[in-house]
């Protein structure tokens, strides 16, 4: 199991103060990594920071807007100063805007693409020197079931998450010679603040449960195992792939 041990590693998790990001951050910490949380809600940052420190790991909470390159560069520099050279990046921060394509405002399209796709590229690009310096690195992008399927109601979200898969493949090819692996996790339907309202849409909820072989929604912490694998030496020959963690939803 030594290949899964993250002791001595430093990870940055965007949107790591809640939902899937929090679940992944806790998973990395349990495997031995020190973690920097990059997000905007300072109260939730403090809560998750305390949870990670209770596990015996060091944690840095940074207020970061991932659409601002200056914030990204500051986050990386502060992480280096407080925890050491970061070699694991989890691009988890994401937003959504609902609306049919004929009605979607251009500003909503731009906002979703900036957070969900452009920020993944900019953060990875800014992290590249640290990973190259260390001689190894792991980038874990977070996709969505909508990376694979279209939707008439979240067109910008679906487009952005589809782009994440292609960005993952391109970065994987470009950086493999530097011993940097770039992969993607595709979460299924996970209980978070973004999905809790689905309980009130009985037909949609029933559709999801009926299509998911596991017969339930997942919990954020259930993303931790895949993240630890992709962040560890165990995945050193795995790059450019997208791994669904969805109870079988994508195979139905």
Image (cartoon, rainbow, N blue to C red):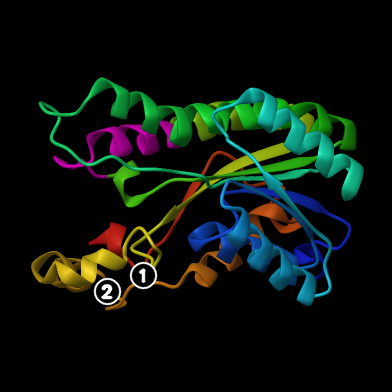
Viewer-closest of 47 and 131: 47
Identity of the residue drawn at 62% across and 54% down: 42
Q: Which mark is residue 247?
A: 1
Identity of the residue drawn at 40% across and 43% down: 95
Work out whether residue 173 can be spotted: no
- Left-right relation of 56 to 216: right
Q: Position of residue 198 (x, y in %)?
A: 22, 65
Predominant SS along the magenta part: helix
Q: Residue furthest front?
A: 43
Q: Which mark is residue 213?
A: 2
Q: Considering only vertical position in the picture, is 62 above or below 51?
A: above
Whether residues under marks 2 and 1 lie with C-beta atoms below 8 angstroms apart, the answer is yes
Q: Position of residue 17 (x, y in %)?
A: 59, 58
Whether the magenta-drawn stretch holds residue 151 is answered as yes
Within 10 Å of the Cα at label 2, are there few (<14), some (14-19), or many (20+) other Cα atoms? Answer: some
The C terminus, quarter of image? bottom left
Which stretch is magenta?
149-165
């Amino acid at each position: 199991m030594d290949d899964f041990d993250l002791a001595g590693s430093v990870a940055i998790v965007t949107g790591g103060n809640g939902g899937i990001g929090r679940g992944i951050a806790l998973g990395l910490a349990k495997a031995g990594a020190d973690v920097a949380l990059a997000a905007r809600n300072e109260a939730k940052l403090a809560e998750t920071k305390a949870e990670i420190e209770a596990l015996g790991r060091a944690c840095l909470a940074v207020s970061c807007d991932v659409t601002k390159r200056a914030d990204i560069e500051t986050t990386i520099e502060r992480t280096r100063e407080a925890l050491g050279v970061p070699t694991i990046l989890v691009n988890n921060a994401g937003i959504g805007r609902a609306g049919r394509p004929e009605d979607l405002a251009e500003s909503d399209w731009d906002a979703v693409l900036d957070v969900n796709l452009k920020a993944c590229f900019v953060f990875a690009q800014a992290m590249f020197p640290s990973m190259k310096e260390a001689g190894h690195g792991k980038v874990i992008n977070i996709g969505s079931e909508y990376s694979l399927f279209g939707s008439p109601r979240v067109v910008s979200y679906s487009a952005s998450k589809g782009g994440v898969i292609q960005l993952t493949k391109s970065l994987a090819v470009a950086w493999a010679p530097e011993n940097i692996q770039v992969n993607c996790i595709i979460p299924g339907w996970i209980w978070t603040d973004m999905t809790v309202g689905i309980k009130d849409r009985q037909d949609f909820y029933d559709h999801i449960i009926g299509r998911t072989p596991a017969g339930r929604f997942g919990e954020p912490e259930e993303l931790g195992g895949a993240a630890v694998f992709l962040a560890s030496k165990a995945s050193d020959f795995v790059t450019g792939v997208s791994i669904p963690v969805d109870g079988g939803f994508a195979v139905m």
